Image (cartoon, rainbow, N blue to C red):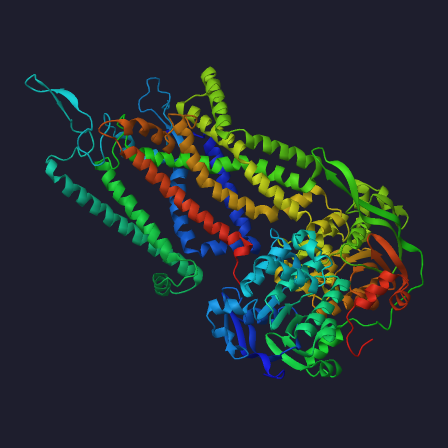
Amino acid sequence: MTMRDPLLRVTDLRTWFNTSSGVLHAVDGIDFEIKRGETFALVGESGSGKSLTALSIMRLLPAAGHVSGAVFLEDQDLLRLPEAEMRQVRGGRIAMIFQEPMTSLNPVLSVGEQIGESLLCHQGLRGAVAHTRVLELLDAVGIAEPRRSYGEYPHQLSGGMKQRVMIAIALAGEPELLIADEPTTALDVTIQAQILELLRNIQRDTGMAILLITHDLGVVSEMADRVAVMYAGKIVESAERERFFGAPQHPYTKKLFDSLPGKSSVKASPGIGTALLQVRDLKVYFPIQKGLFKRTVGYVRAVDGVTLDIAQGRTLALVGESGSGKTTVGKSILQLIRPTAGSVRFGDTDLMRLKGEALRARRADFQIVFQDPYSSLNPRMLIADIIEEGMIVQGVGGSPAERAARVDELLEQVGLSASMKYRYPHEFSGGQRQRIAIARALAVNPKLIICDEPTSALDVSVQAQILNLLKRLQDELGLAYLFITHNLAVVEYLAHDVAVMYQGKIVEYGDVEQVLHHPRHPYTQALLSAVPKIAGRD
Amino acid sequence: MPFKPVILWTDALIFVLVIAVLLFILRARAKEHLRAPWRRVARNRMAMVTLVILLAYVLVGLLDSLHFRPALPDTPSGQREYAVEVLSVLDVLVTPLRTQEEKTYSAPFATHLYAKETVERADGTQERIFPRLRYGGAHLTDLSARGEDIALTALRGFIEGVVAWAAFAALLAAWLARRGRVVYREMLQKIMRGATDIPWRAVLITSGVLIVLTAMAAELGVKYHLLGTDKVGQDVLYQAIKSIRTGLVIGTLTTLVMLPFAVLLGIMAGYFRGVVDDAVQYLYTTLSSIPGVLLIAAAILMLQVYIANHPEQFETVALRADVRLLFLCIILGITSWTGLCRLLRGETLKLREMDYIQAAQAFGVGHFKIITRHILPNVMHIVLITVVLDFSGLVLAEAVLSYVGVGVDPTTLSWGNMINAARLEMAREPMVWWPLLAAFVFMFALVLPANLFSDAVRDAFDPRLRKL
């Protein structure tokens, strides 16, 4: 058998669900091949059917799903294997790793036991032999002290470590094909770089093929040999990597590339006037309490001395990885979390000194847009009521009739139609919900909006629309944004200034050009170098 | 007026509850997110079948909650006087069952008493025999024709029932046809084929069985004691029917008492955290560590003493029994709110971190408004599921408590009291088994549908069970 023979050949794979509202074709007749030792990337936005393709290959679909077509692993049609033999294929010849390392591991079994279980199933190893092999595997996936990690439980490990353990479990069966379903989406960008590097090294050493499922074109560019783009259950384009990035053929692929936030050419940049928001030495400590009487034994320093300024009409991007305290900064500026020390001056008042009614009365000036559009709208309220609520409380917008008119106007302003106001949130897509959340924030005529990762839960094409909307609103209304994000590409598109946060402190602060292109702090440099680059772009 | 209406405490609360339910239905009709899960309930065949049975029980319970004191026929002063006895509309409907009292035990369909009596013959000799019943089968001259008579009467009841059911089915189909704007025949065919969205065919079959059974019981009940009589000769069927109200009152009013505690305290604990949370948690851990039966027994005994010391406050026996029933509901409610309170606290802890609550806080919305507008509607499904699930448990709890002797008043007809009485009846030789069986059948026929219905409601409201 030569390297040129396909390892996996999928022909006319169809997956559908019978629902009460008709048949839902999740995967609609796709064909592809994966050769030994190559990485094949399946790219698409959420709902395009890429994860269901992987589950169909593994025959792990939910009970309501039906599959037709053929999936040949060498000369075996997986869809026609009896379940008992299929179990030997799963984890043995094909292994899979999932997006969410937090929930993929069993919390009550130690790491060593979980890897050992896979060894027992597929290699028949047990006892001392298995123990040695587990240590080898842990070492192979780059876990620093395999002996110690062997007895550790998942909650003692970080997200990146857990994903390494997942990879070790997958490798235990010595698979010929590894299906990686968004393996790095839940991870920070520096950890993502490490995991991708690890996958490349393992592939080089063992010669296994990888089916990489992702929505991130940067990851594709770094990893894939060949790429297929999925849209609405079909593969619309399939090509070698160079040709794919050099000359995308299909209109949808072109649209995907256009949606990537690039450098914006024109940035309305009013001169640095008086600072609208001045944050000085902000500290937020969470007490750690122990014992019967909740004695405070220490503090978690979530935010530890942050100083920043935002002027009228400008955007400050607050960049950092998960756990760096950036969301806490946003919420403590809004006084949703009361800061421990420091000062937050908004205009001429110190918000930290305001309490109760006095603080409530000022709340119209600063608003927030959240990350998750699914949890930020009350599912039991009409859109009109959601948008109107702030106006009623803050006493803006005049009479009920005027308020109703203002709701219509706001919906039009964020690119929705006024006729949508008597619907419930569940009838809208993620992007539309985010627009509603923006309209809700705008309803009280704020001067500052804190955007807490407003686009990271959205697909890349929707992300581009929301970013454009935010930018347009800034130009029209002269809003100031505190834009909290982990995505550096977004920063370059939208922000005037950047603050990089690391472990509760701001490690670098300055003009966007300067920080992104001439970073001085080692952490900023590490962050920037970890971002996957798309070939042919800067 | 030929009667004087009497509104007992529990009557008033029951009608408050009915009005609340009606208002909720009116509100839910207008709001899609409230209507959708109920539509799923309505399309579930099991739910609709059990609902029909439950509605039959509710109807009996409501009829039994319209109380009045009839006017006495002849008053010497010319002034209208009213009887001390408090009757309900149901009592009037089942008058033969209520008034046809025997001397003591008699078996179902019996013509003779179950206990021997000494009677004096015409010739002066005495003999111990089973005497004939005063009402049960009293119309029979030839005792060997009893079987035939029962069969004929039952058949007449069956035919009446089928006719009544046919009329009901025709009316239902006509109403559906008008509402769905289709021809009557077409609608009828659709129902027969079971092709309607809401399983009307199952509804019709269930209500058919119920109507026919009721009609047969009505025909037979006048001539015989269908389920026999008890120690004082009262018809057991009448007791079982009257017990329905007691069971329903315990099952629903207890919840009504419990809800304000559970909802308010649970949400407050979860929302405010800190001291409020500590206080509420302390309260419910303390309450739930006291044995419930002990608390109930103590409270009921205290009430008994109070009633005994203040006879002037309680005009009639019915009023006294009613106060005790209400008190039992209250004390059961007080001991059983902790479970729901815990659930709501947990859910609120989760909800208060939701972005939309934070967004409301960022608008400066007050705490009370956040609780009523944002949190309460989002925990309502938990409240509803708990209420429906608790119902059957409470009906059973009444039986257990009355058996122990701390339940409802001994004069109140209830399944618990019937079971309590059966303690002696089962030990008797020959055994008297029918009151226990009647209580069991009636309670079973209420609790099983209630459980099945609550399962259907839970499934309909549980977002995790929603299929693709």
- The percent position of residue A511, horizontal first and vertical second, equals 90, 64
> Could you tell me residue A174's position as x and y percent?
60, 69
Q: Please say whether residue A216 is visible from this viewpoint.
A: no
Q: Quadrant of the N terminus of chain A?
A: bottom right
User: Where B414 falls versus A480 (above or below)?
Assistant: above
Quadrant holding the C terminus of chain A: bottom right
B87 is higher (above) or lower (below) than A205: above
Q: Is residue B125 above or below residue A53?
A: above
Direction from residue A59 to residue B407 in the image, left or right: left
Is A242 or B150 nearer to us in this picture?
A: A242
Q: Is residue B367 left or right of residue B219?
A: right
Q: How many marks?
A: 0
- At x 45%, y 30%, the residue is B7
Q: Nearer the viewer, residue A63 or A477?
A: A63
In the rendered structure, the answer to whether residue A413 lies left or right of residue A282 reads left
Q: Report the residue that reaches farthest toward the front.
A: A128
Q: Position of residue A386 (x, y in %)?
A: 68, 54
- Name the residue at 34% across, 31% down: B418
Q: Nearer the viewer, residue A323 or A130?
A: A130
Task: Quadrant for residue A233, please give it.
Answer: bottom right
